[in-house]
Image: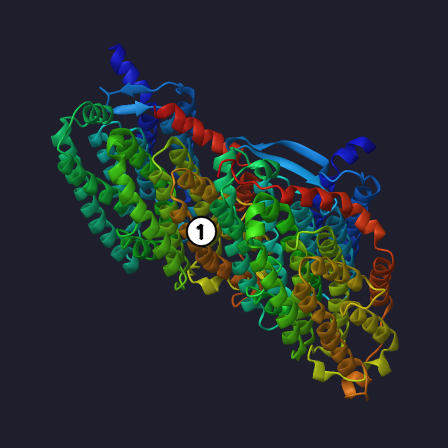
Amino acid sequence: MENIRYDLITALPEIILLGMAMLVLITDLFLKQSNRIAIYGLSQLGLLLAAYFTVTTHVPSVGYAFTGTFVDDTLADVLKLMIYLGTSLIFVYTRQYIQLRNMFRGEFYALVLFSVVGMMIMVSGQSMLTLYIGLELLSLSLYALVALDRDNHRATEAAMKYFVLGALASGMLLYGMSMIYGMTGSLNISDINHALMSGARIHSVLVLGLVFIVAGLAFKLGAVPFQMWVPDVYEGSPTAMTMLISSVPKLAAFAFVIRLLAQALPTLAIDWQQMLLIMAVLSIVLGNVTAIAQTNIKRMLAYSTISHVGFVLLGLMSASGNGYVSAMFYIASYVVMTLAGFGIILLLSRKGFEAENLSDLKGLNQRSPWIAFLMLIVMFSMAGVPPTLGFYAKFAVLQAALQAGFLWVVVFAVLMAVIGAFYYLRVIKLMYFDEPQDHSPITAPFDMRVILSINALALLALGLMPQGLMSICFYAISRSLS
Amino acid sequence: MLDYFLQHILSFAIWLPILAGGLVLFTANDSKPNLTRWAALFGSVVSFLVTIPLYTHFNFADGGFQFQERFLWIMSFNIHYHLGADGIAIPLILLTSFTTVIVVISAWEVIEKRVAQYMASFLIMSGLMIGVFSALDAILYYVFWEAMLIPMFLVIGIWGGPNRVYATVKFFLYTLLGSLLMLVAFIYMFHQTGSFAITDYYQLPMPLNVQVLIFLAFFAAFAVKIPMWPVHTWLPDAHVEAPTGGSVVLAAIALKLGGYSFLRFAMPIAPDAAHHLSGFMIALSLIAIVYIALVALVQKDMKKLIAYSSISHMGFVTLGFFIFNNLGLEGAVVQMISHGFISAAMFLCVGVLYDRVHSRQIDAYGGVANTMPVFAAFAVLFAMANSGLPGTSGFVGEFMVILGAIQVNFWYAFLASFTLIFGAAYTLWMVKRVFYGEVANANVAALKDLNKREFLILAILAILVLALGVYPQPLTDMTNATVTQLLSHLANSKLPVGL
């Protein structure tokens, strides 16, 4: 009895959010379109409650629940709080966009909340099966979200592509997990680690399993050579969904990688380091070089994401506490930048008009100097130019890789960052140096303007004072990984 | 109160102009550009006055860092907010805050579109450049160094000439590439020492091959900025397209960031590599002095000509650094300051003509002296200074460097002194074609002489150029102790004992 009580308290945030998603679905049936805003309020309330219980049930030690398949550690709590915050911002930014496109329905909010629950389970998964279930809950919600606008052909095509390739990746992941299970006799993360440390196993089978696991992870992260779906899905999805796909799920994917590679398979670090290294270098090259040729903002940001994932892998590849902290710092910074960037694209869209070509940004400085300034910060942050947060993200990852002894990889990544700077500069060129083609006024709800401004200025503020976020990442990793 | 101010004077010098720039940007009203202009002028003058005590309260006997401030900034990486300035940095800080005032005045009615953004860019840039000159923590330095690119990128791109986008992107990417390699060097040394303090790097022993790599990483960053041949090609493009204020800041200060950084980082951190590669550096400097001067000779565009002349003069600076003696090093510092005044004045002169005729081509002019006699007098003075006429500041630095070089190798001095011939040739030939002869065309005939604003800024610069030329001692007194200390540091090998 005491055990069940402990289990339920540990998973309280997940349970609350799941309940709220159900409540949203049911309430939605009884609401008229004019009252639907209540759904929005309920969803935000759900995130707030989940955040409250995540904070109040937090303990510095590591706790296991549900017979060791679910873990509550500092890493999980910190990542969950980041996920709530990011999702809450997504709700604010997307409200007007989906209202204007007939997607302001209960399904949107329920599906997003389900995907958040999926992410939370991924973050707290301590067994390969729990992790997998979380991943599937997240992925299936996202497939449905992309296709939510039923009559939109591009979105339907994107959803189809996303689903087929995502299912393939899940299959690979499961296959890899089954091999590890076969070798160690357990699905539990810490049991696998103990089993691998205690005795000799057939190394080739383990590595074969590892290859499939890494390939599956790379699919979900969008790292080269498993990146094909990223640009198409980003471009085809409605911008609100692109924003969701490209931002918070990366936090969960980061936890997923940490749980599987750093906690379950640290004994195979030599093997997965090499795989991550190759994927990191290829992602940085392909992402940065291909982004130059894009004319669609969403596609450009898709390739930019691929290169950012490359940098995250560079941090993870160091296979040290320092490396994991830097990768976590990078991914958190990336989420803040991406949310602000897509927020501005959503702001520029209006009824019947999608801001999705780079030329739609032309002359933004003359239409609205403030929004242009915010986008300027986002772009310089993505390019990694100080004094923005993006600089410290790159700095942290590069120093971790250098500490691990990869000097020439670091030099190479730095050269690629210069190539990357070119396409971010082009966005600034369009906004500041060109004349506007489109003179329509920019309309957005007041709360969105304010929160978007805070979000983008946070890049500058955190760039001047990065210690807080660094400490959070440091404590999360150091208290959770022994 | 005064004590508090003096303890944090460098912070004031950095953050006041940045704050002023922010205020100008956010309180600006496009319908009242005059208000913005006065606000910017007020901000820049106050920022300049704040830097004056750096000179009046300077301890001339001390060659180390003065006015230090230090507190922990980013704990995870042991990064400190550490400021301090020595006898080489302070003249450059004063030059920066002074030039900003000149730039604000020079833009007064010339810049009509987006006045607030223009003024704010220069104010913010001024604070960032003072930050570069006074940072004693590698990452703090790097942040200022890179952040400075952002306003410059916008200034060239928004208010520049027809080919501005190409020029500004080239400027940004060239500089970024070099600086990122420098960042890698910083991180490497961080893992060796556990700190980003520059003074810790000074003490870090390193084998020669490591020193050479670190020196080359710094070289990539600083040679681009100075710029040295063969990585100079961004400068003529950027100068030609930049608005007058942008050119002035680029030539007067931005180039000095590179020169200063050689003295602050590359040479004292890797002294053995600096000695080892000094032949290479001297060769590049001499190529810049002689070859680039010849390139300047054939330019048809006045701004391009002055840009090449800047590269050639900066060759003197690097030559002075790498002959490792007192005269050379001190001459190089004097040359940096003097070139700050002269190049600023030359670009302002071109700006005066460009505002009236909207052409920078030499052959669009002729006989300007007939219609603008006062202006012609100033222009001839600055041209003389640029070609190193005794009595002007241009002479002092070049002469000291040549004297220093002759102690090391006669042929270095011989080649370097060619600049006195070529410099006179390209500058005076341009002056002859633009200012003398018959009035060339209707545009020139319609020219009006200097207005009060233009007269004021050119007169101030003329006084400074002459004063520094006749009596350079206040400047050399400042640099003396620091230069001596730097040279004694450079004389000691940092190779690990036993290797």
Q: How far across and how far down the image is residue B116, in percent?
A: 70, 57
**Residue positioned 67% across, 77% down in the render:** B297
A448 to B121, vertically: above or below: above
Q: What quarter of the picture does the C terminus of chain A occupy?
A: top left
A170 to B174, vertically: above or below: above
**Residue positioned 54% across, 47% down in the render:** A449
Q: How far across and how far down the image is residue A96, in percent?
A: 45, 49
Q: Is residue B149 visible?
A: yes
Q: Is residue A95 visible?
A: no
Q: What quarter of the picture does the N terminus of chain A occupy?
A: top left
- Kind of residue at badge 1: Val
Q: How far across and how far down the image is residue B201, in percent?
A: 57, 38
Picture quarter containing residue A71?
top left
Picture quarter containing residue B331?
bottom right
For the residue carrying disc 1, how many other residues have a C-alpha within 10 Å: few (<14), some (14-19), or many (20+)? many
Q: Residue furthest top?
A: A2
- Give B217 or B273, whichever is nearer the viewer: B273
**Residue positioned 58% across, 42% down in the render:** B493
Q: Which residue is mark 1?
A: A414
Judged from the image, the secondary structure of the residue bearing numbered disc 1 is helix
Label 1 chain ID: A
B458 to B449, vertically: above or below: above
| A236 left or right of B15 in image | left
Q: How far across and how far down the image is residue B270, in percent?
A: 56, 45
Q: How many labels were placed on the picture?
A: 1
**Residue positioned 26% across, 33% down in the render:** A260
| A17 left or right of A468 in image | left
